[in-house]
Image (spheres, rainbow, N blue to C red):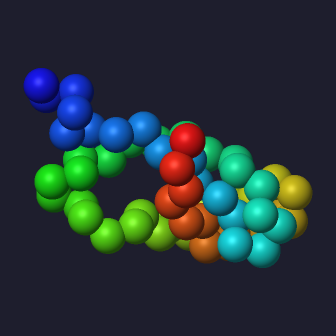
């Protein structure tokens, strides 16, 4: 039952639309879509990465 709470997700770059990172989040604690500034090796700069489904 505990595995139902944490979900696997991918982070997609908002500029190049490539899925560069994989992560997990707790569905109960974080209901909104995850949005982080991460390094995009294709753009060669830090960009906003948003959560997308696996």
Direction from residue 12 to residue 3 in the image, left or right: left
Task: Work out which quarter of the rendered image holds the N terminus and state it.
Answer: top left
Q: How many marks?
A: 0
Direction from residue 25 to residue 44 in the image, left or right: right
Q: Position of residue 54 (x, y in %)?
A: 55, 41
Q: Position of residue 34 (x, y in %)?
A: 42, 64
Which residue shows up at 78% across the image and 74% down it? 15
Residue 44 found in image quarter: bottom right
Which residue shows up at 70% across the image and 48% down it? 20
Which of these two is toward me, 53 or 34? 53
Which residue shows up at 61% across the image and 73% down it? 48
Which residue shows up at 24% across the image and 47% down it? 26
Q: Position of residue 23 (x, y in %)?
A: 46, 42
Direction from residue 13 to residue 53 in the image, left or right: left
Q: Is residue 1 above or below residue 4?
A: above
Direction from residue 12 to residue 52 in the image, left or right: left
């Amino acid at each position: 039952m505990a595995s139902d709470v944490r979900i696997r997700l991918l982070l997609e770059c908002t500029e190049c639309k490539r899925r560069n990172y994989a992560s997990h989040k707790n569905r109960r604690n974080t209901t909104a879509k995850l949005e982080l500034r991460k390094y995009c090796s294709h753009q060669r700069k830090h960009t906003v990465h948003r959560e997308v489904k696996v």
